[in-house]
Amino acid sequence: MSVYWKIFTDAGNQDKALKVAKSAIKSVGVSQIDIVVEQYHKGGFSCSFETLTESSNWSDVVVSTIQLAQNIGRAYIISGSINNELEMWSNDPSVSGVTHIQVMAIKNA
C-alpha cells in the first residue's frame, strides 16, 4: 500500500528544498525514492514522495505510517475517515528546514 508524503520548506531555491527533503526522507528511515519538488504558492517549496508499506493490512498501515511520521514531526492532526483513509498534518516538524508535513494513506488506492 502506498503512503504519500509532502514536505513543505521555506528554502530559497529548488536545490536547497531538495536537500531538506532528502534529510527528511533519511529521518523517516526509508530508502532513496523519487522526489517531486514544486514551488509552493505561499512561498518556498513542497517536496512530494511516495513510500510503500510492507503490509496490506489497513490497521498495520495506519500504525506504521504514524510511527514513521513521528520520526520527522510532532503534534499531528489526524483527519479523514480512519476506516478508509489516514490524513495527517503537522506544523511542528523535527527536521531542520521543514515548515509543515502532510502524510496520507488511502485504503485500496
Image: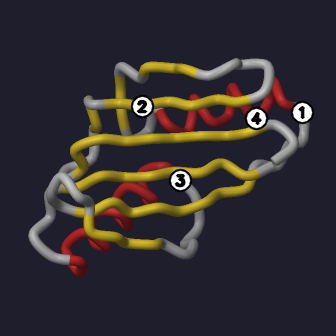
- What coloring was used for the rendering? secondary structure
Q: Quadrant of residue 84?
A: top right
User: Which amino acid is tagged 3?
Assistant: Gly
What secondary structure is marked by label 3? loop
Q: Is residue 43 left or right of residue 65?
A: left
What secondary structure is marked by label 4? helix
Please state which of the two labelled residues, at mark 2 or mark 4, is closer to the viewer.
2
- The residue singled out by tag 4 in the image is 61
- The residue singled out by tag 3 in the image is 29
User: Foreground residue, 22 or 46?
Assistant: 46
- The residue singled out by tag 2 in the image is 89
Please state which of the two labelled residues, at mark 1 or mark 3, is closer to the viewer.
1
- The picture places residue 13, in percent across and down from the top left corner, at 15, 76
Q: Quadrant of residue 93?
A: top left
- The residue singled out by tag 1 in the image is 57
Please state which of the two labelled residues, at mark 1 or mark 2, is closer to the viewer.
2
- Report if the CB atoms under discs 1 and 4 are less than 8 Å apart: yes
Please determine whether, in this image, residue 49 is positioned above or below residue 80. below
User: Which amino acid is tagged 1?
Assistant: Asn
Q: Is residue 93 left or right of residue 63?
A: left
Give the residue displayed 80% in from the left and 29% down from the top.
60
Residue sitting at the far front: 41
- Report if the CB atoms under discs 2 and 3 are less than 8 Å apart: no
Q: Earlier in the sequence, mark 2 or mark 3?
A: 3
What secondary structure is marked by label 2? strand
